[in-house]
Image (spheres, rainbow, N blue to C red):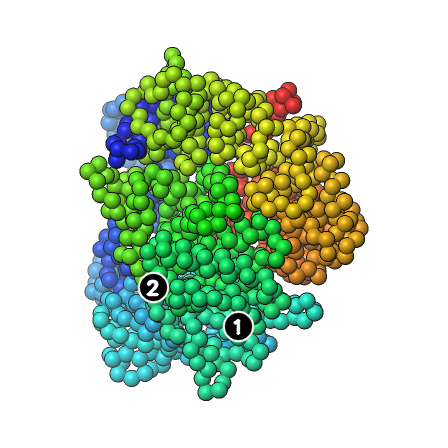
C-alpha cells in the first residue's frame, strides 16, 4: 500500500559563478504503486504542464486589462477546465461517441482490434428502404422552406435579426433589471482606465448606514460602447456621465450583475480611444457587519462604556463594497477622500488631513501623491488617541482607543527604526508624508498594509509595559511585514492575484531579515526556521499548488492568501539570496523598485532585475533557475548513499529542478555550495549533512548508514551541527517516517540525544512532531498507546522540563523553549509542571492580580486553573474585565481548552454570536477546542450545523474559513470521518465544495489513516 518510488538518477550540472553552482537533476523514474501521501507525491510530481497563455486576437474591447505585455508561462490547477458552454459540448460529444462505440462493438469479433476485417454487405429490407426515402423527403422539404424564407437568425423572441448581421454575440448574462449585461468575464475589460477618484462618504454610526458620492475621471483606451466596473451591496441612486463627445452631463442607466459584483453603463454612441470622461455615482449602503468593506465595530472601555466606530478592510475584493470602482490591482489611480463625522469622532485616511470645510464636520484629505490600487485605500471614523514622532521627514503615528495609549510605545519605536532600515536597504525613501499604524478593536486579519494607514488587530500592535519578549516578537514581526509592503505591494504591485507571492512572499521574507538585523534580541531566526518547516509540510500535500497558479474566480483569489504565497514564497527568496553572489540580491531589488515604481509587475520582472544586477561572464538567468520552484508544486528529495567509502548525492524526483545544495561534514565544518561533477562526490568523511542551516527548500534522506553516522555524531557531541541543522535533521526524519522511508525506530534513535539538547529549535520541533502523533492516537482512542506515548515524551524531556524556571526570563529564545516544554508537560499532567502552575495562579489571585505571571507562562497557568469548575468561572470573569489584549487572548485559549462538554458548546455559541467573545476570535477558539479529545467532535458537528452562518461572517475561501476547516479535521484518521467530511462538503456545492482547503483536509485524513494503519503494529512493539 505505502511503498516507495524506484528512481534511476543522473545529475546534470550547470556552471554558475565560480563561488557557487546550481545543480539541475534529471531523473528517470519507475513508479511503484503509491498512496497519494503528504510528501511523496508532491515532491515527486510529474514535470509540470506549461500552458502558454497566448490567446487568439480579440476585439480591443474584449481584452481584459493588463498594464504590461510581459507574460509568464503558468502551470495552474484546473488549467484544462472548460467553461460551462464548452463543457456541455464536450460532455455531449463524449456521450455520443461512447454510445456509438458501445453499440458498434457489441457485435465485434473477439479478434485483435488491430486486425483488418473483410468487408461485409447485405441487402436492406423493404421497410428500411421506405423509412430512408421518407427521411430524405423531410430533409429536402425543410431545406426548401429555409431557402425561400427571408434571411433570419432565430432568437428567443422569434426572427427579428437578418442573417446578414455579424456573428452571434457572446452569451451575455441577464442583469438585475432583465437586460443583457454587456460583459462575460471575471476580470474587467481593458477599454477604460481610471485616472482619479473623488470620494465623499457620510457614515451614520447610529443607524449603521452610509451614503457616498463618487466621481471617477477616466481615459478611454480602446473604442467602446460600455463602461464596466465593480459595485457590491451598494444602492446606486443616481449616475451621470460627462464627456466631450456627450457635450453635456447626462443621466444614464446602470446595469448590475450581482454574481460577479459588476455594474455597467451602455452608450449608443461609441467612445473613442484617447477621450476622457467623468462618471459620477450617488449611492447608499449599510455598514458591513462582517470584517470586510466599510464595516462597523465597537469597543467597551474600562468603565463599561461602549463606543462604536467604522473602519475598512478592502483586500482583496471589498473596496467595491464601499464605493463603485475598478477593483483590480492593475487599475491604479489617485484618490481624494472626504469623510463627514459627528463631533467627538476623528477621521483617518491614507493621506494627511488638509482642512475642515465651511465649519462643517467634513474632513478632507490630500489628493494622493501616488497611484494606488483600490485595495490599498482606507478610512476610519473613530475616537482614537495617538503618539507620534518624525522619521526622515515622515510623521509616524500609532493610534489606539484612549484606554490603551500606554501600550503603543513599543510599536512606535519599532516602526520608526524599521522605517529607517527599509529606507536605506531599498535605497528609496518611503513615498508619503505620514505613516499611521492603527489598532482596531474588532479586526479579523492580523494587519493590513493600506498605504499610509496600516490597520492592525490590537494584539498585533499593542504591547503592555510588562510584556514578554515573545509578545514583542509577535508585534515586531507584524509591523516589519506591513512596512515592507509599503514598497513591495504598494509602490510596486502585482498585476493580478496569481502573482500574490510578489507581495506576500517578499513581505514575509523581509520581516524576518529586517528583524534579524535591527532587533537581534527578539530571536526571530528560530521563528523563521519554524515557518519554513510549516511551509514544507503544507507544500508536501498533493493538493497544494504552485506559487504561481491560475486565478479565475473570486473564491480562488481568497484562497491565494495561504502558506504557499506567504511562507513558501519567503523560503524560496531565502534560498535564492543565499545562492547569489555578494550584494546581487539587494542590487536587484533596488533596480526592481526603481524601474517599476508606481507600476504593476509579474514575477518575470523581478527575476530580470535580479539577473541584470550583476552581469558576469558565467552569469545565468535567475528566471531559468527559479522557474521550477514557481511553476510546479512540491519540492525535491535529495538522497545521499554510501558506496565503497564514497558518498554519492543524487535527487529523487520526477521533475527538473535547479537546486542550490550546501553541506557540512566532519572534516570541514564550514558551508560550501557544491557542484556535482561525478557520482563520486565526497571521499573519506564519516558523516555529511546537506542543506546547511536549512536555507534550501528541500529535504534529505541519508540512507541507513548515513543516518546512523549522523546520530552517532550527535550522541558524541551535539555542537558538531548548528541548532538549525539539528532541527532540520529531526524535521526530515519525521517527514521520511511518514513516507515509509525510515522506520519509527530510527526516529526514536535520533531523539535519544535530545535530553542533552539546550537550544530552542530542535526541542520545539521534536515536541511538535511527537505531540501530533500523540493527538492522533488520542483521537483514535488507542488508550494503551496513548499512555505509552505520554510516558515516552515525559521521560525523554523530563530533565529539560525540570530545569525550567518559573520567574521572569529576558531571553526570547529561552522563553520560547520554556513555554513549549512546560505547556507540553502540563497538558500531559507532569506533576512538577501542574504543581508549579497551580501555585503561580494561587499567588496571582491572592495578590489581587498584582503579582504578574510571566507573559510566556500565562497561557499554561490559566489553562491549568481552568480545569476545575471554580477556576474556569474565575478565568471567565477575568476575561470579561481584562483590557490588555494579549493577556485576554491567553485567557480565552484557557477557557476553550476545557474538556467539559457543556462549556465547549457554550463557548462555540458565544464566539459565533459575538456575545462575550468577539467573532474575530472564532478561528482561534475552533483550533483550541479541536485539540482536546472532547472538543474535536463537537467542533466538527458545530461546523455542519452552522455552516451557513459561518460563511455569512467569513467569505467562502477566506483565511478564516481555511483555518476553521483545517483545525477541525486535521486529527481525523478513520474511514468514517473521511466519508463524513467528503459527504458534507460535497453537499455544499457552490457554498464551499470547490475550496482547495477541502481537498487538503481530505488528503490529510487519508494520510493520517495510512500512517496509522502502517505504524500501529510497530508502535505497540516499540513503545
Residue 366 in sight here: yes
Residue that carries the numbered disc 1 in the rendered image: 381
Numbered circle sitting on residue 259: none
Q: Tell me if residue 982 comes above or below residue 113 in the rendering.
A: below
Disc 1 is placed on an element classified as strand
The outermost residue toward the top is 644
Q: Can you give x and y, in whole percent of width and height, for residue 867 in the image?
A: 75, 45
Question: Dots 1 and 2: beta carbons under 8 Å?
Answer: no
Answer left or right for 816 relative to 41: right
Instruction: Give the residue at x 74% y 46%.
Output: 840
Instruction: Give the residue at x 48% y 32%.
Output: 722
Precedes in sequence: disc 1 or disc 2: 2
> 463 or 453: nearer the eye?
463
Q: Quadrant of residue 966?
A: top right
Query: For the residues carrying marks 1 and 2, which lies nearer the camera in this image?
Result: 1
Q: Tell me if residue 690 comes above or below residue 269 in the rendering.
A: above
Q: Can you give x and y, in whole percent of width and height, for residue 171 in the image?
A: 34, 60
Task: Report, in whole angstroms, how far the alpha carbon at label 1 lies from the one at label 2.
Answer: 26 Å
Answer left or right for 379 relative to 914: left
Q: Can you give x and y, in whole percent of width and height, for residue 148 in the image?
A: 21, 63
Q: Quadrant of residue 308?
A: bottom right
Q: Can you give x and y, in whole percent of width and height, for residue 753 in the image?
A: 57, 25
> 592 or 804: nearer the eye?
804
Residue 498 in sight here: no
Disc 2 is placed on an element classified as loop
Answer left or right for 683 relative to 983: left
Instruction: Give the residue at x 77% y 57%.
Output: 848
Answer left or right for 844 relative to 444: right
Task: Count all numbered tags in the image, as a single digit.
Answer: 2
Instruction: Give the residue at x 36% y 39%.
Output: 578
Residue that carries the numbered disc 2 in the rendered image: 331
Quadrant position of the C terminus in the picture: top right
Amino acid at each position: 500500500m505505502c511503498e516507495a518510488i524506484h528512481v534511476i538518477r543522473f545529475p546534470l550540472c550547470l556552471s554558475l559563478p565560480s563561488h557557487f553552482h546550481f545543480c539541475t537533476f534529471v531523473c528517470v523514474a519507475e513508479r511503484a504503486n503509491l498512496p497519494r501521501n503528504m510528501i511523496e507525491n508532491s515532491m515527486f510530481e510529474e514535470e509540470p504542464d506549461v500552458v502558454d497563455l497566448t490567446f487568439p486576437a480579440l476585439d480591443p474591447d474584449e481584452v481584459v486589462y493588463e498594464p504590461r505585455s510581459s507574460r509568464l508561462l503558468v502551470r495552474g490547477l484546473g488549467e484544462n477546465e472548460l467553461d460551462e458552454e464548452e463543457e456541455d459540448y464536450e460532455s455531449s460529444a463524449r456521450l455520443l461517441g461512447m454510445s456509438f462505440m458501445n453499440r458498434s462493438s457489441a457485435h465485434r469479433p473477439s479478434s485483435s482490434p488491430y486486425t483488418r476485417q473483410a468487408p461485409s454487405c447485405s441487402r436492406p429490407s423493404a421497410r428500411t428502404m421506405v423509412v430512408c426515402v421518407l427521411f430524405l423527403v423531410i430533409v429536402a422539404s425543410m431545406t426548401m422552406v429555409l431557402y425561400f424564407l427571408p434571411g433570419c437568425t432565430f432568437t428567443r423572441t422569434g426572427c427579428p435579426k437578418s442573417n446578414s448581421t455579424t456573428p452571434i454575440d457572446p452569451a451575455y448574462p441577464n442583469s438585475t433589471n432583465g437586460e443583457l449585461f454587456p460583459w462575460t468575464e471575471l476580470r474587467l475589460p481593458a477599454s477604460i482606465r481610471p485616472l482619479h477618484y473623488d470620494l465623499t462618504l457620510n457614515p451614520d454610526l447610529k443607524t449603521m448606514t452610509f451614503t457616498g458620492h463618487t466621481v471617477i475621471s477616466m481615459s478611454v483606451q480602446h473604442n467602446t460602447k460600455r463602461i464596466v466596473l465593480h459595485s457590491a451591496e451598494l444602492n446606486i441612486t443616481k449616475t451621470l456621465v460627462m464627456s466631450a463627445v456627450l457635450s453635456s452631463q447626462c443621466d444614464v442607466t446602470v446595469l448590475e450583475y450581482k454574481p460577479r459584483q459588476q455594474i455597467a453603463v451602455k452608450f449608443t454612441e461609441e467612445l473613442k480611444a484617447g477621450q476622457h470622461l467623468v462618471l459620477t455615482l450617488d449611492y447608499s449602503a449599510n455598514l458591513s457587519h462582517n470584517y470586510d468593506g466599510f464595516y462597523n465595530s465597537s469597543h467597551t472601555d474600562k468603565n463599561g462604556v461602549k463606543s462604536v466606530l467604522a473602519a475598512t478592510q478592502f483586500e482583496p475584493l471589498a473596496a467595491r463594497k464601499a464605493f463603485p470602482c475598478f477593483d483590480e490591482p492593475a487599475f491604479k489611480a489617485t484618490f481624494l477622500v472626504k469623510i463627514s463625522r459627528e463631533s467627538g469622532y476623528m477621521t483617518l485616511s491614507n493621506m494627511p488631513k488638509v482642512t475642515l470645510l465651511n465649519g462643517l464636520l467634513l474632513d478632507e484629505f490630500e489628493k494622493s501623491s501616488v497611484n494606488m490600487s483600490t485595495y490599498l485605500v482606507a478610512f476610519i471614523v473613530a475616537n482614537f488617541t495617538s503618539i507620534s514622532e518624525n522619521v526622515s521627514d515622515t510623521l509616524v503615528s500609532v493610534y489606539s482607543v484612549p484606554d490603551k495609549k500606554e501600550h503603543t510605545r513599543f510599536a512606535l519605536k519599532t516602526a520608526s527604526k524599521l522605517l529607517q532600515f527599509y529606507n536605506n536597504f531599498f535605497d528609496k525613501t518611503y513615498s508619503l508624508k505620514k505613516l499611521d499604524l492603527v489598532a482596531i478593536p474588532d479586526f479579523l486579519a492580523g494587519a493590513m498594509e493600506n498605504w499610509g494607514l496600516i490597520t492592525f488587530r490590537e494584539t498585533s500592535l499593542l504591547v503592555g509595559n510588562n510584556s514578554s519578549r515573545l509578545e514583542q516578537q509577535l508585534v515586531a514581526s507584524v509591523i516589519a511585514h506591513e512596512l515592507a509592503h509599503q514598497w513591495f505591494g504598494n509602490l510596486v504591485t502585482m498585476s493580478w492575484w496569481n502573482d500574490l507571492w510578489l507581495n506576500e512572499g517578499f513581505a514575509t521574507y523581509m520581516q524576518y531579515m529586517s528583524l534579524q538585523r535591527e532587533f537581534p534580541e527578539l530571536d526571530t531566526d528560530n521563528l523563521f526556521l519554524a515557518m519554513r518547516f510549516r511551509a514544507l509540510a503544507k507544500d508536501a500535500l498533493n493538493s497544494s499548488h504552485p506559487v504561481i497558479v491560475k486565478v479565475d474566480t473570486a473564491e480562488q483569489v481568497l484562497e491565494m492568501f495561504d502558506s504557499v504565497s506567504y511562507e513558501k514564497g519567503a523560503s524560496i527568496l531565502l534560498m535564492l539570496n543565499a545562492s547569489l553572489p555578494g550584494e546581487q540580491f539587494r542590487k536587484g531589488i533596488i533596480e526592481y523598485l526603481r524601474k517599476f515604481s508606481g507600476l504593476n509587475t509579474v514575477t518575470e520582472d523581478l527575476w530580470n532585475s535580479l539577473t541584470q544586477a550583476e552581469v558576469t561572464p558565467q552569469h545565468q538567468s535567475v528566471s531559468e533557475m527559479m522557474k521550477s520552484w514557481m511553476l510546479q508544486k512540491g519540492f525535491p528529495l535529495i538522497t545521499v548513499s554510501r558506496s565503497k567509502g564514497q558518498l554519492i548525492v543524487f535527487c529523487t524526483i520526477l521533475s527538473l529542478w535547479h537546486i542550490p545544495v550546501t553541506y557540512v561534514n566532519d572534516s570541514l565544518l564550514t558551508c560550501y555550495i557544491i557542484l556535482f561533477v561525478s557520482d563520486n562526490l565526497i571521499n573519506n568523511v564519516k558523516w555529511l549533512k546537506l542543506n546547511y542551516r536549512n536555507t534550501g527548500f528541500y529535504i534529505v534522506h541519508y540512507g541507513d548508514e548515513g543516518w546512523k553516522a549522523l546520530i552517532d555524531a550527535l550522541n558524541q557531541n551535539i555542537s558538531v551541527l548548528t541548532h538549525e541543522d539539528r532541527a532540520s535533521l529531526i524535521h526530515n526524519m519525521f517527514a521520511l517516517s511518514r513516507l515509509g522511508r525510515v522506520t519509527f525506530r530510527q526516529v526514536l534513535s535520533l531523539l535519544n540525544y535530545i535530553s542533552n539538547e539546550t537550544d530552542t529549535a530542535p526541542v520545539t520541533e521534536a515536541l511538535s512532531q511527537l505531540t501530533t502523533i500523540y493527538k492522533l492516537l488520542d483521537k483514535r482512542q488507542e488508550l494503551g498507546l496513548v499512555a505509552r506515548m505520554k510516558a515516552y515524551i515525559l521521560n525523554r524531556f523530563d530533565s529539560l522540563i525540570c530545569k525550567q524556571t518559573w520567574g521572569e526570563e529576558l531571553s526570547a529564545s529561552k522563553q520560547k523553549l520554556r513555554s513549549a516544554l512546560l505547556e507540553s508537560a502540563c497538558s500531559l499532567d507532569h506533576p512538577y509542571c501542574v504543581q508549579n502552575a497551580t501555585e503561580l495562579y494561587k499567588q496571582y489571585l491572592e495578590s489581587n492580580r498584582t503579582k504578574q505571571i510571566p507573559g510566556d507562562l500565562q497561557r499554561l497557568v490559566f489553562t491549568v486553573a481552568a480545569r476545575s469548575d471554580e477556576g474556569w468561572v474565575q478565568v471567565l470573569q477575568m476575561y470579561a474585565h481584562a483590557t490588555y489584549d494579549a493577556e485576554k487572548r491567553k485567557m480565552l485559549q484557557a477557557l476553550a481548552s476545557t474538556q467539559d462538554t457543556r462549556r465547549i458548546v457554550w463557548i462555540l455559541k458565544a464566539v459565533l454570536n459575538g456575545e462575550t467573545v468577539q467573532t474575530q476570535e472564532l478561528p482561534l477558539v475552533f483550533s483550541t477546542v479541536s485539540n482536546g479529545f472532547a472538543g474535536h467532535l463537537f467542533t466538527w458537528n458545530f461546523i455542519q450545523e452552522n455552516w451557513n452562518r459561518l460563511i455569512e461572517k467569513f467569505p467562502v475561501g477566506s483565511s478564516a474559513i481555511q483555518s476553521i476547516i483545517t483545525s477541525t479535521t486535521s486529527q481525523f484518521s478513520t474511514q468514517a470521518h473521511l466519508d463524513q467530511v467528503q459527504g458534507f462538503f460535497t453537499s455544499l456545492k457552490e457554498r464551499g465544495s470547490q475550496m482547495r482547503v477541502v481537498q487538503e483536509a481530505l488528503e490529510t485524513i487519508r494520510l493520517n489513516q495510512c500512517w496509522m494503519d502502517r505504524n500501529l503494529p510497530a508502535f505497540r512493539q516499540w513503545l
